[in-house]
Image: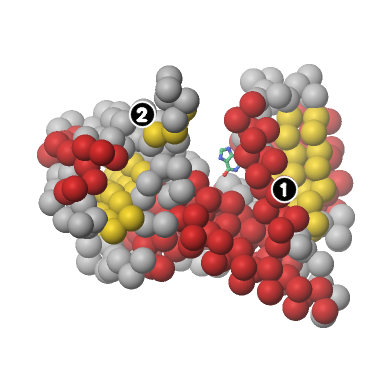
């Protein structure tokens, strides 16, 4: 029998303890304030932003919302970020991606003060992760480490195969697993013999953005499978990058979609906000 990794429950546990921590900080006169910026009308982004603001409210973090029109110029956005960087009341700044095409995401990410970059996307925070120094860590990969640890899954010395090499998930995931003493392989769209490699994984982390791409042929008996994907199927149900029904009997532990990795991203964002307020 596989163990179903309950991201919903684990994220709730994290949010509950953050709520207590935020209340204690308030007693000491420290407020947690997160600025959330969204540019344009991307429907998925709107849902994510709404969920992030809800989580803030639940935990006691004040969120300040900037809902900017699609036609906002890069200069206008940078001006807002400058203002938030200088605002002593604000200790976290999040600019929801993707941004409209006329805005250069790299420029925007770089403009956010690394000390307020609760997404962990700023090159300074990414660099800190590479050399094992303190800094904000990207929320989805940080959430996956929490899922594994709180499920008592051993990482040390294990072969971890990551499918996907994005800046937000794949690359920071590889660095975090390395920090936990895993042996790490990163696969991507140019990888040859993908199945041959994923079949050697003790821990398989999939973030490729293709519905049900990973079936039982890719998975070793007893592997732990972490599914980062989330897709709406024609029947309206959600599915991940992993074909859950095909794979689940082979695994020793697996994350469901929904209710696996997804809720952890927001829990870790809240964690980063609270850390930001403490270090401020
Ligand atoms: N778009 C998709 N995931 C994320 C995320 O974690 N943070 C931000 N800011 N935008 C995203």
Residue sitting at x 73%, y 70%: 22
| Residue 97 falls left or right of residue 195 | right
Say above or below: 83 vs 240: below
Quadrant of the rendered image containing residue 41: top right
Label whose residue precedes the other's in the sequence (1 or 2): 1
User: How far apart, in angstroms, are the residues tagged by discs 1 and 2?
Assistant: 28 Å
Residue 128, position as x, y percentages in the image: 52, 60
Quick one: quadrant of the C terminus?
bottom right
Q: Which is more toward the observer, 159 or 4? A: 4
Disc 2 crowd rating (10 Å Cα; few below 14, some 14-19, many 20+) is: some
Instruction: Give the percent coordinates (x, y) of residue 54.
Output: 71, 49
Residue at the spot 76% in from the left edge and 73% down from the top edge: 23
Task: Name the one closer to the observer, 61 or 98.
Answer: 61
Q: Which residue is mark 1?
A: 53
Q: In the image, what residue occupies the spot 81% across and 67% down?
A: 31
Q: Could you tell me residue 3's position as x and y percent?
A: 28, 58
Label 1 neighbourhood size at 10 Å, few (<14), some (14-19), many (20+)?
Answer: many
State whether residue 109 is above or below residue 192: below
> Is residue 227 visible in this depiction of the protein?
yes
Q: Which residue is mark 2?
A: 211
Q: How is the image coloured?
A: secondary structure
Q: For ligand 1, which image quadrant applies? A: top right
Query: If the image is split into quadrants, where does the N terminus sit?
Result: bottom left
Q: Position of residue 26 (x, y in %)?
A: 81, 73
Q: Secondary structure at mark 2?
A: loop
Q: Is mark 1 within 8 Å of ligand 1?
A: no
Is residue 202 in sight in this rendering?
Answer: no
């Amino acid at each position: 029998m596989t163990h179903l990794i309950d991201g919903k429950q684990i994220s709730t546990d994290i949010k509950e303890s953050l709520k207590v921590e935020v209340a204690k900080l308030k007693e000491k006169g420290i407020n947690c304030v997160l600025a959330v910026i969204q540019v344009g009308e991307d429907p998925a982004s709107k849902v994510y932003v709404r969920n992030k603001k809800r989580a803030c409210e639940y935990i006691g973090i004040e969120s300040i919302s900037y809902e900017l029109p699609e036609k906002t110029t890069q200069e206008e956005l940078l001006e807002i970020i400058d203002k938030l960087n200088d605002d002593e009341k604000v200790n976290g700044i999040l600019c929801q991606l993707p941004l409209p095409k006329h805005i250069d995401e790299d420029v925007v990410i770089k403009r956010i003060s690394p000390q307020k970059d609760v997404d962990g996307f700023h090159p300074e925070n990414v660099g800190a992760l590479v050399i094992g120094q303190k800094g904000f860590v990207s929320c989805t990969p940080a959430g996956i480490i929490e899922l594994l640890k709180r499920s008592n899954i051993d990482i040390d010395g294990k072969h971890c195969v990551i499918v996907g090499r994005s800046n937000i998930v794949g690359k920071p995931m590889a660095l975090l697993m390395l920090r936990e003493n895993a042996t790490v392989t990163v696969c991507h769209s140019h990888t040859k013999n993908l199945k041959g490699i994923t079949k050697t994984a003790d821990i398989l982390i999939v973030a490729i953005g293709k519905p049900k791409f990973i079936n039982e042929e890719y998975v070793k008996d007893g592997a732990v499978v972490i599914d980062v994907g989330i897709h709406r199927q024609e029947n309206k149900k959600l599915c991940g990058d992993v074909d859950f029904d095909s794979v689940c009997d082979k695994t020793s532990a697996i994350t469901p979609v929904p209710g696996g990795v997804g809720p952890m991203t927001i829990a870790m964002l809240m964690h980063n906000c609270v850390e930001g307020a403490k270090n401020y």
